[in-house]
Image (cartoon, rainbow, N blue to C red):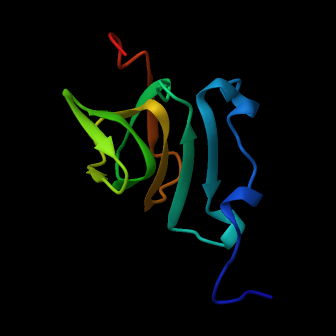
């Protein structure tokens, strides 16, 4: 039986980074199916101090917004690098390449946006250089 709502707790969801050999980066939990959502989703990241996400990514259709919940860090969007702190919000257009880097105390992020199956493109080694 379907209901008009879904409910879960982020900490009850599986941390997927160990599954992909990326546990040293921190934690990543994705919320969509767990609450019955089809067209939207949330991603929750707890990044370890000084770590980058490991790849840039972009989309064909999905627009995203990121909220820094705790800590600090930086985001690279295309060719621009922005400093981020708690409660900062960054909107990223679908085609813009983005990658995050945690500061010395780590960074906790919440990402939200539309869900379009197969829409993401990963770019390995996209942000190189100084940390």
Image vertical order of residue 40 relative to residue 45, above or below: below
- Residue at 44% x, 34% y is 121
- Residue at 75% x, 32% y is 19
- Residue at 75% x, 49% y is 14
What x and y, as percent, mark residue 100?
A: 40, 34
| Image quarter (top left, top right, bottom left or bottom right) of the N terminus | bottom right
Outermost residue toward the front in this view: 105
Image vertical order of residue 52 relative to residue 59, above or below: above
Image vertical order of residue 58 relative to residue 113, above or below: above
How many marks are shown on the rendered structure? 0
Going by the image, does 109 lie left or right of 91?
right
Most foreground residue, 72 or 111: 72
Most foreground residue, 47 or 65: 47
What x and y, as percent, mark residue 120?
A: 46, 41
Going by the image, does 73 lie left or right of 118?
left
| Image quarter (top left, top right, bottom left or bottom right) of the C terminus | top left
Outermost residue toward the top in this view: 129
What x and y, as percent, mark residue 13?
A: 74, 56
């Amino acid at each position: 039986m379907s209901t008009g709502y879904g409910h879960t707790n982020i900490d009850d969801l599986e941390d997927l980074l160990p599954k992909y050999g990326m546990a040293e980066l921190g934690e990543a939990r994705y919320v969509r199916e767990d609450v019955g959502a089809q067209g939207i989703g949330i991603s929750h990241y707890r990044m370890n101090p000084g770590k980058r996400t490991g790849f840039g990514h972009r989309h064909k259709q999905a627009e995203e917004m990121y909220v820094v919940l705790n800590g600090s860090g930086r985001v690279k969007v295309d060719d621009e690098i922005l400093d981020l702190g708690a409660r900062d919000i960054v909107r990223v257009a679908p085609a813009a390449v983005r990658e995050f880097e945690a500061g010395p105390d780590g960074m906790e992020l919440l990402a939200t946006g539309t869900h379009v199956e197969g829409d993401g493109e990963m770019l390995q080694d996209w942000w190189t250089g100084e940390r």
